[in-house]
Image (tube, helix red, strand yellow):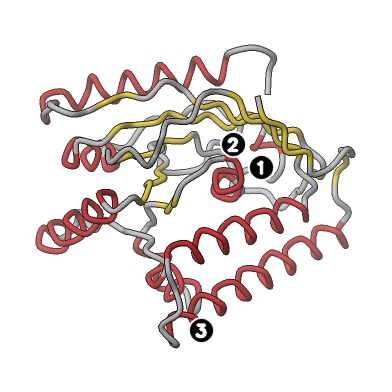
Amino acid sequence: MKRLNLSPLTESATLLRRAAVVLGSVGLTALYSLLVLLRALFGKLDRRIVDKYCREWSAALLKLVRTSLTVRGEVPDFNDGRRYIIMSTHASHYDIPVSFVSLPGSIRMLAKKELFKIPLLGQAMAAAEFPSIDRSNRQNAVRDLDRARAMMESGIVLWAAPEGTRSPDGNLLPFKKGCFHLALDTEAVIVPVAIRGIHRVLPARSMQINLGQPVDVRVGTPIDTAGKSKEDLAGVMEEVRQRLEELLGDGEAG
């Protein structure tokens, strides 16, 4: 078990502190987006630098809300030549920063295509190898899938949220099929990750920020999809759901 203690205090943020967290988060995101784009412009951007920026950005965001992290479970060797997809619970905007700080490897979020339209952030994500799969257009989907597979084969670990949207209370919502199709198409190893307590930091559809919240990251047993076909899709989805529910329910409440 690994502890990343970023704060000993727990409290509800005042209006002034909330404003500081929001402005600080926007500023940090803009700063690191600019750093990525400037390095890309001068041909000095590589995966190692992106990994470093992602973790620095994430740690800074979590320090703003003074989150205390605990990591449990055995993380696979992401450098063994296999393709990996982290499938995580999704109950907060902070799921991604928590994952970047808690887990090793060159992790990249499987992003919604709408995020790439955000000025500065979208361009930085594209330069930093954040993939998107556009399944509304078959030609684009085939191209995006080929790119995602090549990225995974070169060592990138994809992060995806099968729920598709944030849970307001930390309980699992219904799964969407997109990331499971990708896992089967690439014969990836699925790594289930449950992030307990994260919904209390910034509850969904709320501007209430709670400082110093304990967050428990739990890594489950990997699921190998090699040799599985589309007929196995429902079974794989159910197996991932069962493992995430076990991780969420294991031990003290998050």
Q: Position of residue 41 (x, y in %)?
A: 43, 86
In the rendered image, the vertical position of residue 94 relative to residue 127, given as above or below: above
Mark 3, secondary structure of its residue: helix
Look at label 2 and name its amino acid. Answer: Pro
Kindly identify which residue carries mark 2: 168
Residue under the point 16% across and 56% down: 146
Disc nearest the viewer among 3 and 1? 3
Look at label 3 and name its amino acid. Answer: Leu
Crowd band around label 2 with a 10 angstrom C-alpha radius: few (<14), some (14–19), many (20+): some
Crowd band around label 1 with a 10 angstrom C-alpha radius: few (<14), some (14–19), many (20+): many
Q: How many tags in the picture?
A: 3
The residues tagged by marks 2 and 1 sit, at their Cα atoms, a distance apart of 6 Å
Is 17 on the left or on the right of 252, as rendered?
right
In the rendered image, the vertical position of residue 223 relative to residue 3, given as above or below: above
Q: Position of residue 23 (x, y in %)?
A: 74, 69
Is 220 on the left or on the right of 80, as rendered?
right
Q: Position of residue 40 (x, y in %)?
A: 43, 80
Task: Please give the label number shown on residue 203.
Answer: 1
Residue extending farthest to the front is 80
Kindly identify which residue carries mark 3: 38
Q: Position of residue 111 (x, y in %)?
A: 39, 56
Looking at the image, is mark 3 or mark 1 earlier in the sequence? 3
Residue under the point 69% across and 46% down: 202
Looking at the image, is mark 2 or mark 1 earlier in the sequence? 2
Mark 1, secondary structure of its residue: loop
Residue extending farthest to the bottom is 42
Mark 2 and mark 1 residues within 8 Å of each other at the beta carbon: yes
